[in-house]
Image (tube, rainbow, N blue to C red):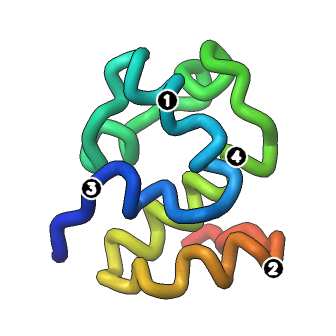
C-alpha cells in the first residue's frame, strides 16, 4: 500500500476543510485517521458528508485506489458495506 500524506489523503473535498482541526487534535497521519471511531468523529463535529468522505478515502486507501478519491467524493455516494 502506498504512503500518503494526510493532505493527500484528505484530497480537495470536505475533509480538506477539517484538515487544520484534525492536525491540531492529533489526527496527523493516515493510519491514525483511518481508525477514527464514530465517537471521535462526533467529538470534532464532523458532518455526515465528512464522515462519508473519510469512509470512502479509507476504503480506497486500503485498496491502493486513492487516485479516485476526489471523483468519488464529489459524486456523493457512500461505500457499500462488505
Label 1, secondary structure: give it. helix
Image quadrant holding the C terminus, namely bottom right
Q: Are marks 4 and 1 in contact (CB under 8 Å)?
A: no
The first of marks 4 and 3 along the sequence is 3
The first of marks 2 and 4 along the sequence is 4
Residue designated by label 3: 5
Real-space Cα separation, disc 2 to disc 4, in angstroms: 13 Å
The first of marks 2 and 1 along the sequence is 1
Label 2, secondary structure: give it. helix
Q: Assess disc 3: are there few (<14), some (14-19) or many (≥20) residues with their C-alpha within 10 Å of its C-alpha.
A: few
Q: Assess disc 2: are there few (<14), some (14-19) or many (≥20) residues with their C-alpha within 10 Å of its C-alpha.
A: few
Q: Residue at x 60, y 63 (%)?
A: 12
Residue designated by label 2: 75
Q: Are marks 4 and 3 in contact (CB under 8 Å)?
A: no
Q: Are marks 2 and 1 in contact (CB under 8 Å)?
A: no
Q: How many marks?
A: 4
Would residue 71 appear left or right of 3 to someone viewing this image? right
Residue designated by label 4: 50
* Nearer-the-camera pick, 54 or 37: 54
Real-space Cα separation, disc 2 to disc 1, in angstroms: 24 Å
Q: Which mark is residue 20?
A: 1
Would residue 66 appear left or right of 55 to someone viewing this image? left
Marks 4, 3: nearer the viewer: 3
Q: Residue at x 41, y 17 (%)?
A: 24
Amino acid at each position: 500500500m502506498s504512503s500518503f500524506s494526510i493532505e493527500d489523503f484528505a484530497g480537495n473535498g470536505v475533509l480538506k476543510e477539517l484538515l487544520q482541526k484534525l492536525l491540531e487534535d492529533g489526527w496527523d497521519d493516515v493510519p491514525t485517521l483511518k481508525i477514527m471511531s464514530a465517537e471521535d468523529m462526533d467529538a470534532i463535529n464532523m458532518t455526515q458528508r465528512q464522515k462519508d468522505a473519510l469512509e470512502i478515502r479509507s476504503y480506497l486507501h486500503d485498496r491502493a485506489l486513492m487516485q479516485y478519491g476526489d471523483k468519488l467524493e464529489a459524486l456523493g455516494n457512500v461505500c457499500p458495506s462488505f
